[in-house]
Amino acid sequence: MSKPALVIFDLDNTILNGDSDYAMINYLVHTQALDESAGKQNQIFIEDYQRGELDFDAYTTFALSAYIGMTRSEINEYMLPFVAKVIEPMINTLALKIIHDHVDRGDAILLASATNELIVRPIAERLDIQNVIGTQVKFNDGKCTGEYIPPSALGAGKLQLVDQWMHDNGYEDFTDVTFYSDSINDLPLLEAVDFPKAVNPDAMLEKISLERGWEIIDLPIL
């Protein structure tokens, strides 16, 4: 029996109307787990990301700093209300319809996000997506070190992690694979798949999509 067609979704600004990592830092500032200066630094990093110029090591050190020394259970005490209060209103219902249409066709769904797994996994659970790739976080003796496990799930690293996931799950190559993303940072994976889909693309990805004839999907913010 052949494998179901694989459909990959980016998370931030694709399924969500916004960036979950950025929103999480602001949530931690709001709840006073981080101070106000973190919010200003967060804005600088998101602007770097939008230009495709993010220093991922520096950002990850910054983004994971609040969790150092915490267990997964302790971290989830932040994540669960964050998903309920902040992420839930960010979910684009039209993006959910696209996911559900693929599920109804029998396609396999993979969520692949550069955001760290501490955030991505509870969001994936809310979206009822079982297959998940996020930047992996290092734990020692059950406690977060504030470091990530290379490669990150950004750019070429996302391509590498998706390729490994496919190999582990019986997909030989990117033939008939679809990928939905908004970001120029996902260009390596978009170039690898047969069916790249640019969802509300940033300016750089829109330009490339028009040049290459890739489908552009403009989703209203619903």
Image (cartoon, rainbow, N blue to C red):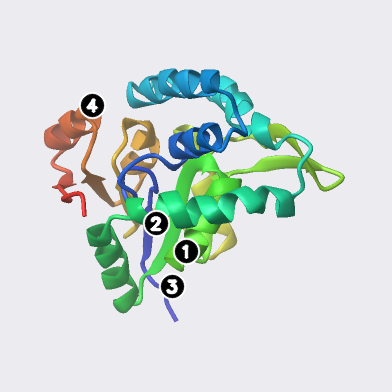
The residue that mark 1 highlights is 126
Identify the residue at image location x=65%, y=53%: 76
Identify the mark nearer the N-term, 1 or 3: 3
In the image shown, does 143 or 2 lie closer to the viewer? 143
**Mark 1 Cα-neighbour bin, 10 Å: few <14, some 14–19, many ≥20:** some
Q: Quadrant for the C terminus, please.
A: bottom left
User: What kind of residue is marked 3?
Assistant: Lys
Q: Disc 1 versus disc 3: distance between alpha carbons? A: 25 Å
Q: Secondary structure at mark 1?
A: helix
Q: Disc 1 versus disc 2: distance between alpha carbons? A: 9 Å
User: What kind of residue is marked 1?
Assistant: Arg
**Mark 3 Cα-neighbour bin, 10 Å: few <14, some 14–19, many ≥20:** few
Q: Is residue 187 left or right of residue 202?
A: right
The residue that mark 3 highlights is 3
What is the x, y in percent for residue 151? 60, 35
Circle 3/circle 2 CB separation < 8 Å: no
In the image shown, does 109 or 165 lie closer to the viewer? 109
Dividing the picture into quarters, in which one does residue 4 lie?
bottom left
Q: Disc 4 versus disc 3: distance between alpha carbons? A: 34 Å
Say if 24 sits above or below 132 in the image. Answer: above
Closer to the observer: label 1 or label 3? 1
Circle 4/circle 3 CB separation < 8 Å: no
Circle 1/circle 3 CB separation < 8 Å: no
What is the x, y in percent for residue 59? 55, 24
The residue that mark 2 highlights is 88
Q: Is residue 5 left or right of residue 72?
A: left
Q: Secondary structure at mark 2?
A: helix
Identify the mark nearer the N-term, 3 or 2: 3
